[in-house]
Image (cartoon, grey):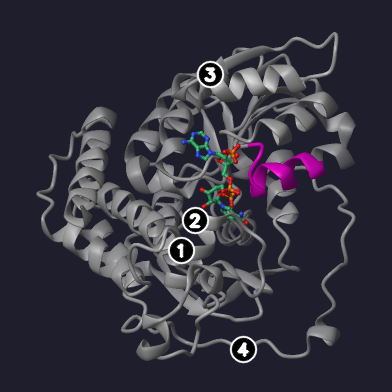
């Protein structure tokens, strides 16, 4: 039985170049890096569609450069702003509202979808791509947390495949290739996700109680969007990634470990039953996993400094402090609890991060809010569908916001 949704060499369907690409979340950190990869290898891709949220200016610049036939934004005001910024003589179709992202994800002319919207908003577009049988380069980990089981089922039914963009899961994929054929994986023992530890590694509770959004947004190694930067500071990012790894590779949560590695050079490891550990190393630049997932199985050159281990000198590793950073524990507990608890965890985290960024709660309140939401959630039945999970998501948000009012 296939228990993974990543593509394995033995299962590689034909995916000729140039690949026709749709980028969901093109105006974000991942989207911008992906378009840099595309610009470096213009012969490999045709950009068919770009989708942003509300950043009309950046989307207009991207659209002018790549000339896709379809664009999507969140609302009419952004669409009007965008239309006015496009060059004369270029009139793409502009879709608006959440449904536009799902339309783009399933466009018949698109064979490759980069799913890089942030948060639960990426779930339905990712599910639409999975149902439409697309090759999905997945950055939006929240969609696997919210409804990984549904995405896996849609992939199985349609033949869609998911290639992980997240650096850790891409690292695992690279360390697994050639070792697991057809999903048996009998020689695989565990997955080890590395974590930078975030900006507050080694700090105490008194320090954490007073940290500001600006401090939380300042990641030591990676340049990323606001939400994932705060998630890295709380270690919720690693919690979401544990769930993402379970969904991608079909392992129980007990066989996915987390190892803090402050230099962010070793991006993750796979341990086999003979004790061998295979790791993926590289500079911390998302263009590497993005290019790998967009081009797989082709490897392409990237104009960036190469990893020089002699210059790095020292690589260190330590256990995560789950006492001080309880989000990691909460994520593992939610995944073990039920099919719907991860959706609640994710929604509560999104609300808590927004409240923290807007100065309404403290950093240490983030796990407290999430724990409250998890405690009051009654598990949905195993056959819960997308609408059920999204209702749990909406209910969680509503109740947490009501608590703050
Ligand atoms: N950044 C990284 O290095 C990194 C690494 C691994 C995984 N990821 C994952 O990749 C995803 C994107 O992260 P990011 O750092 O690129 O985030 P980001 O910089 O905040 O960008 C988010 C993108 O999503 C769009 N967006 C926001 N809300 C939306 C909504 N409600 N509907 C539709 N589009 C919406 C934004 O549009 P506008 O800006 O136009 O409003 C933007 O294009 C996340 O799931 C994250 O966990 C990121």
Q: Is residue 74 above or below residue 222?
A: above
Q: Is residue 160 magenta?
A: no
For this rendering, which residue is in front, 70 or 405?
405
Q: Residues within 10 Å of mark 1 (few under 14, many from 20)?
A: many
- Find disc 2 in the rendering and name its residue: 227
Image quarter for ligand 1: top right
Q: Identify the residue at horizontal 46%, vertical 89% (top origin).
A: 203
Whole-angstrom CA distance, mark 2 to mark 1, is 6 Å
Whole-angstrom CA distance, mark 3 to mark 1, is 30 Å
Mark toward the viewer: 3 or 1: 3
For this rendering, which residue is in front, 309 or 361?
361
Most common SS among magenta residues: helix
- Find disc 4 in the rendering and name its residue: 316
170 with respect to 358 (left or right): right
- Is residue 106 among the parts visible in the rendering? no
Whole-angstrom CA distance, mark 1 to mark 4, is 22 Å
- Judged from the image, the secondary structure of the residue bearing numbered disc 3 is helix
* Residues at marks 2 and 1 touching, judged by CB atoms closer than 8 Å: yes
35 with respect to 186 (left or right): right
Mark 2 Cβ inside 8 Å of ligand 1? yes
For this rendering, which residue is in front, 195 or 11?
195
- Find disc 3 in the rendering and name its residue: 76
- Find disc 1 in the rendering and name its residue: 231
Q: Identify the residue at horizontal 66%, vertical 80% (top origin).
A: 263
């Amino acid at each position: 039985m296939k228990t993974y949704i990543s593509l394995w060499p033995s299962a590689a369907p034909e995916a000729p170049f140039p690949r026709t690409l749709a980028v969901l979340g093109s105006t974000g950190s991942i989207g911008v890096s992906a378009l840099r990869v595309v610009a470096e290898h213009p012969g490999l891709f045709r950009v068919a569609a770009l989708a942003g949220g509300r950043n009309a200016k950046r989307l207009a610049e991207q659209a002018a450069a790549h000339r896709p036939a379809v664009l999507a934004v969140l609302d009419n005001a952004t669409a009007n702003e965008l239309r006015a910024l496009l060059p004369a003589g270029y009139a793409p179709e502009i879709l608006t509202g959440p449904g536009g992202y799902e339309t783009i994800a399933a466009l018949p002319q698109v064979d490759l979808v980069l799913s890089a919207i942030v948060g639960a908003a990426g779930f339905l577009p990712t599910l639409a791509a999975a149902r439409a049988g697309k090759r999905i380069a997945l950055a939006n980990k929240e969609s696997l947390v919210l409804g990984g089981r549904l995405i896996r089922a849609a992939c199985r039914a349609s033949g869609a495949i998911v290639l992980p963009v997240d650096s850790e899961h891409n690292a695992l994929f690279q360390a697994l290739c050639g070792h697991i054929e057809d999903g048996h994986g009998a020689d695989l023992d565990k997955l080890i996700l590395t974590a930078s530890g975030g900006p507050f590694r080694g700090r105490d509770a008194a320090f954490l109680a007073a940290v500001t959004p600006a401090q939380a947004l300042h990641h030591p190694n990676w340049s990323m969007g606001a939400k994932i930067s705060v998630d890295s500071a709380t270690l919720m990012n690693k919690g979401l990634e544990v769930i993402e790894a379970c969904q991608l590779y079909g392992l129980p949560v007990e066989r996915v470990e987390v190892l803090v590695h402050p230099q962010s050079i070793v991006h993750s490891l796979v341990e086999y039953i003979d004790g061998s550990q295979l790791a993926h190393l590289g500079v911390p630049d998302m263009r590497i996993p993005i290019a790998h997932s967009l081009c797989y199985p082709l490897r392409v050159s990237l104009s960036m400094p190469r990893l020089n281990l002699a210059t790095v000198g020292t690589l260190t590793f330590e256990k995560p402090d789950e006492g001080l950073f309880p989000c990691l524990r909460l994520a593992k507990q939610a995944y073990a609890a039920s099919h719907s608890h991860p959706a609640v965890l994710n929604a509560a985290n999104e609300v808590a991060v927004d409240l923290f960024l807007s100065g309404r709660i403290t950093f240490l309140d983030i796990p407290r809010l999430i724990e409250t939401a998890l405690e009051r959630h009654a598990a949905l039945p195993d056959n819960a569908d997308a609408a059920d999970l999204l209702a749990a998501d909406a209910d969680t948000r509503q109740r947490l916001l009501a608590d703050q009012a």
